[in-house]
Amino acid sequence: MMNDDLPPPPDEDGDIVLPPPKMTVTVMMNDDLPPPPDEDGDSVDIVLPPPKMTVTVFSHEEIHLTMSKTCLEVLQNLGKSFGDAYMLVEPSEKAGEIISPFCVQNQTGLEIVMKLDNSFEMPQDADNFKVKMTPDRRLELWNKKKGLSRKASVIKAAQEGDEKKFIFQIEQFNATREVTVKRAEKRLYQINHKTYPGDIWSVIVNTETPIGHKILSIQSMVTVIVNTETPIGHKILSIQSMVQIKNHFEIPVEVFYKDDVSVKSCGELLFKPVYEKVSSNFSVLLQAVYTPGGEFLFKPVYENYQVSKETVSWRGAENLGTVQLACQGESGHSAFYISVRAEIENVYFDVGDTMSAKSFIFHLSPTVILHNLLPYPISFQLEGTEEHTTLQKGKNTALLNACVGKSNVEIVIPIYEGKEWIGHRSITNDLPELSMLTFEAYEGAQQVTQNLGLHCKKNDGCMDISVYSPYWMVNKTGQDLYYKASDGEDFTTHCHDNLDIVMFSFKQKTLFSTKKKDAKGKETTKGKEPAKGKEPAKGKEPDQKKTKEWKQSGKASLKIATSEWSDKFSLDTVGSSGDVQCKSTKKQTFSVGVKITLSSSGLTKICTFTPFYMLLNTLSSSLTKICIFTPFYMLLNTSEVDYPVSSGLTKICTFTPFYMLLNTSEYSLMCQETGQEGDDWIQVASKECKPFWPVQSGKDLTMKAKFSGSAVETSQFLFSKPHTTLMKLLDQLKKAEAQKYKDEGNKVFKDGFYKEAIKYYSRALHTCPYSYFKERSIMYSNRAACKLHMEKYDEAIKDCSKAIDLHPHYLKAVLRRAELYEKVEKLEEALADYQRMIELDPSHYIARAACMRLPDQIKEKNEKMKEEMMGKYRYHYMI
């Protein structure tokens, strides 16, 4: 008897475990492959070099991946954002412009001499292969022209560019250094000059490789850092100092340094254009770096601001973190604040492959950037400033006069629902990521409030503050809509002729439920409308308490026109759509379609309300008369009527009971409605389907079930709504089911189908409760007997051991394990089991006989093993 429909057999513990999908990952390194053949003019195919590494992931089975609608929408928004950002960046090279393969830049502030080899075309001012480079000079270098085969690979020729060597000299210090350009990297070269307090001047050579161009820029540090940039086919070699400054402002900033006597300017940092995401570095001159203190000061390039009194030094940059510098304004102007963050970059020394040298980059950025994520323009005013500044929707601006920890900002929504809304917030370091910002307005003498959100994120020394609304409501129904939070009585009106977005939010219970009297007091203290044109009051928030986290979640109710309030529904299921039912007093039900999407910022959910049913006329003329006369077949039992279905002229109406009882189990079941205990139980045989006519009425209809012939009933469960529920059975019923599996296993065991018997015994172990340890012990012992006949002795021993652990006095399992130990020649273990049997049953003749013969066998076995070991030893000694 074969049973192919059985599920996978349980493991040794009785648990059914599905095998994991088989996957193969192959990683192939191509470093040892032979080089491709040389290209010549007669070659037809272009041979490209193989990849350095190939990773192949292969699945032997089909794997299903699940992606939610929210995930797909977020990915779509990310792709759109990346595309928009790409379109904003203006390319540095024009179409059709020819770019030199190498470029050398001197950013040290000193005059240097570059010595070129004869592979370059010499510039006009070259003298004996030497070119003098004044500070800030940019030298374009071209290779000598060399013929290229018509069919040769241009890509391969660009990838296999010649390795170039440059020699630069700083005659002022009698220093000569050689630079080899292989890849994009930064290397530090010390030069022959030393100043107080023991600094050895160095430069950094920075190599960058944009596409098809190489730039060698020499920058200062009193150690010279050579920075090689290598865009594809274009290498930029920059010789610069070890201190760089990056300006993240949209205005120019001037840099100063302190020497022994005075404060001197060392140049201006050009501002970062709005369309550029990354600003270029400003290399500090060597003489500005190697001062006793190594200190720098800053000021915006405006006449009404002074140089910052505080300084930053590259000597203590590793412990600097982020500091806030103030540039005091002239009389009547607030201070200009600069956030300075130090970045330590490890670079190579001139020789070696260890990045043990250091380069320092100071990032200058605004302290606070304000983002307007509302669908309306706002205006803001910092405490101490003269006037409001307008910020359009979707835009952001830097708060140049904001001091984190001291400044207060007033934010105004000039026009929203015909009112002016005003909110205040102190800018502190401990602002949570999400907090509530309350705006106040007046309808005559009555004060009204609107709660919006404030998102705070700290990005590398700069604080990004975004004003947003948790929910945008869009009304496309043509009817008046009313929105209400589930935990309050206040509602928001959205008129049918208002095509603008209505902002909606939930109140946070933790902020208002515990101290209702205090909350009323706060509302009365806000009753005075601030005079226009005046500065916002300092410390507008009461007692400067720490702002609490604001989490938006909850359910809302909807009302359309004169209907009643709908049932509560969630506004947080992004990517979903459905309908909301609003019943009216005239027995009319309004079905409103709801679609919830996520804004590009990820902070706002956009809820669009439309009529659930729409009439769409796609005809070219007006819809006038449509007359269709069709006979109907009314069918009560479709199995007894033969009817044509291919003509398309007849509608077939099938009537069935709304509720059907289907028993897919292997047992006969009985069902009964809740509250109908006096009625008979409905019996449903295995694999049978029966009609069911409930007596109950209402939304939540329940019933209970039991096995035929059993008095044990399940708990009540719903049958009027779709669901899947596992009803717990008592251990006695599980034990009976396990006994059934064991009996089936005994039958097939007697017929010699040991493999099938193992499946039944495993099912029995999986079903039988752990509290019936004796029954489980018998099942393990029976499965061991099957494995004994299949000569799977090790597995059989394991099953016997589990049976003995569950029932230590089970003689049959101990005897079976002893016999198995003898078969695998583990005589000592077998003797221990036979001795154990004698302790349990002294009259057991099989155990007594084994205890008499096994000691001699064990002794003989040990002597034989000893002779084999001595033989091996003598053979090894003779060799």
Image (cartoon, rainbow, N blue to C red):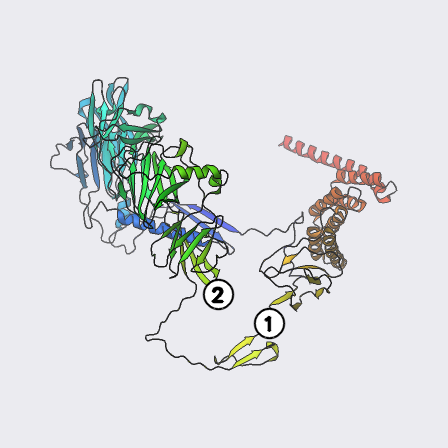
Could you classify mark 1 by the number of other residues whose Cα lies within 10 Å: few (under 14), some (14-19), or many (20 or more)? few
Residue drawn at 58 percent across, 58 percent down: 723
Which of 331 and 48 lies nearest the eye of the viewer?
A: 331
Residue at the farthest left position: 124
Q: Secondary structure at mark 2?
A: loop
The location of residue 343, given as percent across then percent down, is 33, 31
- Occupied quadrant, residue 746: bottom right
Q: Is residue 1 visible?
A: no
Which of 780 and 766 lies nearest the eye of the viewer?
A: 766
| Tag 1 residue | 656
Amino acid type, label 2: Lys
Q: Is residue 755 left or right of residue 289?
A: right
Could you classify mark 2 by the number of other residues whose Cα lies within 10 Å: few (under 14), some (14-19), or many (20 or more)? few
Mark 2–mark 1 distance (CA, rounded to whole Å)? 32 Å
The location of residue 339, given as percent across then percent down, is 31, 31
Mark number, residue 586? 2
Which of 837 and 722 lies nearest the eye of the viewer?
A: 722
Q: Is residue 743 left or right of residue 406?
A: right
442 is higher (above) or lower (below) than 404: below
- Occupied quadrant, residue 388: top left
The location of residue 410, given as percent across then percent down, is 32, 38
Amino acid type, label 1: Thr
Mark number, residue 812? none
Q: Secondary structure at mark 1?
A: loop
The quadrant the C terminus occupies is top right
- Count of numbered badges drawn on the protein: 2
Dot 2 or dot 1: first in sequence order is 2
Q: Is residue 628 left or right of residue 680?
A: left
